[in-house]
Amino acid sequence: MRKKQKTKQHNPFYDSTLKARHTSAKRFKKFTLTSLIFSIAFLIFFLFDIVGKGIPAFSVAYIKIDVAYNEKSVEDSRLAVEKKYRKIVSRAWLREIPNQVRQNPQLMNTIQSIWVLADDQVDQYLKGHHHKLKDKNRVIVDELYAQNLIQRKFNTVFFTNGDSKIPEYAGFFSAMVGSVLTLIITMLVAFPIGVMTAIYLEEFADDNKLTRFIEININNLAAIPSILFGLLGLAIFINLFGMPRSSPLVGGLTLALMTLPIIIVSSRAALRAVPDSIRQAGYGLGLNKIQVTKDHVLPLAFPGVLTGSIIGLAQAMGETAPLIIIGMIAFIPDAPTMVTEAATVMPAQLFTWAGMPEGMYIEKTAAGIMVLLSILISLNIVAIYLRKKLEVKL
Amino acid sequence: MSTFKSRNKQRELQEKLIKLALISAAIISILTTFGILFSIVFEAIEFFKLRSFWYFITGTIWSPGVEGSQFGALAIFTGTFVITIIALSVAVPIGLGSAIYMSEYASSSLRDYLKPVLEILAGIPTVVYGFFAAITVAPLVVQIAGFLGLEATFNSALASGVVMGIMIIPVISSLSDDVIRAVPASQRRAASALGMTQAEVIKNIVLPSAMPGIISASLLGLSKALGETMIVVMAAGLRPNLSINPLEDMTTVTVTIVNSLVGDFEFNSPETLSAFALGLMLFIVTLILNMISLSLIRAFKEKYKVNTL
């Protein structure tokens, strides 16, 4: 003990505050680590929450019962099943009966024992969620379940149907088609304009006032709230040019203007990364500026341009606010076939479902989120893969 | 010789045409900004012809769609302000803390993994955050508040503010991380040589140097929070509420814009046009924030001669 004190006293570097300073340094490091861990923990909690809520939506209850195809049931589809089952069978499915008969005329005047989509309350009851099934019907369901006549099967409806006011019949298909149409317009407009602007600014423009103005403009455009692009779309495309409301055309154009800065900025970075020696070699061979840019600089910058565009596309795919403003939250049961028809897109469909009171819509929203997120993640992986694969060592 | 000349002329013409096409593409981006500005300004002027500008700025009653509808946006501005403050008080410390850990403590290989993970947060669509805020976080806030003996609504400003804050974390952490790493290593070494602990180097030397960039990142986060729509549309309330209690429901500028436009009003009614007046406010505020943010980062770039930001 005495010896230690002696060394302390004789140590010219001994600082009595050192211990406290080291503790404080450790505390600081812990704080930074905690904040990082918090973000990652949130991400994990979020993913588990969404997957936990969404997984049940991928299976849905079906009932095996006798369905009578005859004149009466074609006229009033509820008559196709026995009265006691009417409440537990999907009304929407029964409405398809006239359609089925039209497609398969030999079904007429037969009784088929087939798997029929169950009512959403039956499905929620089987999943152990909150349900409004009456006691009488619950007994029937329990009986059928014991006989294995009610089963949960893979939910194909979700991937083949459009939206529906009847929860068990609502699907994601028309929203997916709407998203594809919208994004095609977005890319057709944003990609050429974005890349051309980047080429102009990086390869051709002199450093003058106009160029600097364009640059500041692009930076600002990137940070303008997306909802304001919706106001632009409403005022210019719909009210001024009279384009059809709720259509992928207007949605695509609005998203294109939003995506433009992302494509321009990433394409410029890619062009800037091409070394000057390539250009100088081209000039040395007597090529002009356009030839050098087109045949030598652009191919080398292409992976970066592509990656930026895919990331821009992914962002446009998740955007909702501007599309709500231009009316793309319409109720769309059938998938659009033209870019001028009313359509909805995936995030807008999620928004609509999230506002519905029935429990089944919550499930479907979460399932839709899983679909949307997996597409977005795949797009990002494709972007990274392409960049890695196409990247030329410069 | 003459064919060579004519080919050369053709080439020049071609070059001019292509250059013209490229310039016109660049002009489109300018047109977009002016398009946004003018489309919003003109409709906003229409609105202010119908309703008083001063009442819009200072009035407290927002009652569209009823007889003698009134448009006093003060309660809406208050709600936006409260939710934004909540979002920033989540995002700034966590984002900055994460940035410091990634740039100063983590090994470069760990950092290569961490940064993309944080950026996933930025890639999640806002409608998804909105759903999460409304379905999972809001009930949680009510439960926790109840446990503490407080009363919270299911549309509390707290729930949407916190989720919005989490959404903004990558905006702040990514830019701060870049800026902190751009601070020259010689400064750190000099400070270490004077006997500072690593935390002291960061707090006394690195952070003050990186401050313009950090402020710039926070301002970007602020403008993102002000303009964020889906989270608040889905999780915050619809009722303009002149209160600063985060457990109550309140509404924001963006929510009111959406509500004014999804109704069945005529396009030229003050109800619809009020959306453009609010949009104009949003545009002006975010534009100012972006300008300050950009000039701060430019000053930092010039001071430390970095090109990668």
Image: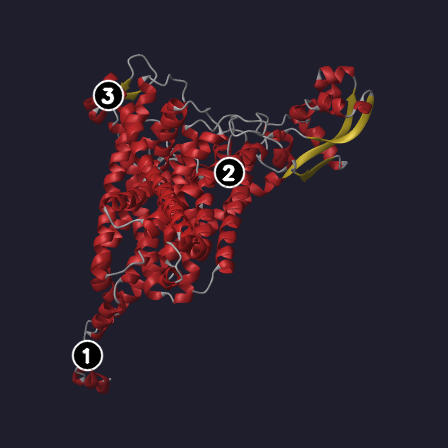
Amino acid at dot 2: Ile
Q: Measured from the top left, where is residue B40 in percent x and y?
A: 30, 28
The residue under the point 24% across, 69% down is B188
Amino acid at dot 3: Phe
Q: Measured from the top left, where is residue A294 in percent x and y?
A: 43, 52
**Res. A14 mark:** 1
* Separation (CA) of disc 1 from disc 3: 71 Å
Along the line of sight, which residue is nearer the eye, A376 or B38? B38
State which chain disc 1 sits on. A
State which chain disc 2 sits on. A
State which chain disc 3 sits on. B
Q: Quadrant of the N terminus of chain A?
A: bottom left
Quarter location, residue A27: bottom left
Report if residue A188 is visible in the image. Answer: yes
| Residue to which mark 2 is pinned | A184
Along the line of sight, which residue is nearer the eye, B195 or B219? B219
Amino acid at dot 1: Tyr
Report if residue A31 is visible in the image. Answer: no
The residue under the point 50% across, 58% down is A390
Q: Measured from the top left, where is residue B231 in percent x and y?
A: 40, 37
**Mark 1 element type:** loop
| Residue to which mark 3 is pinned | B48
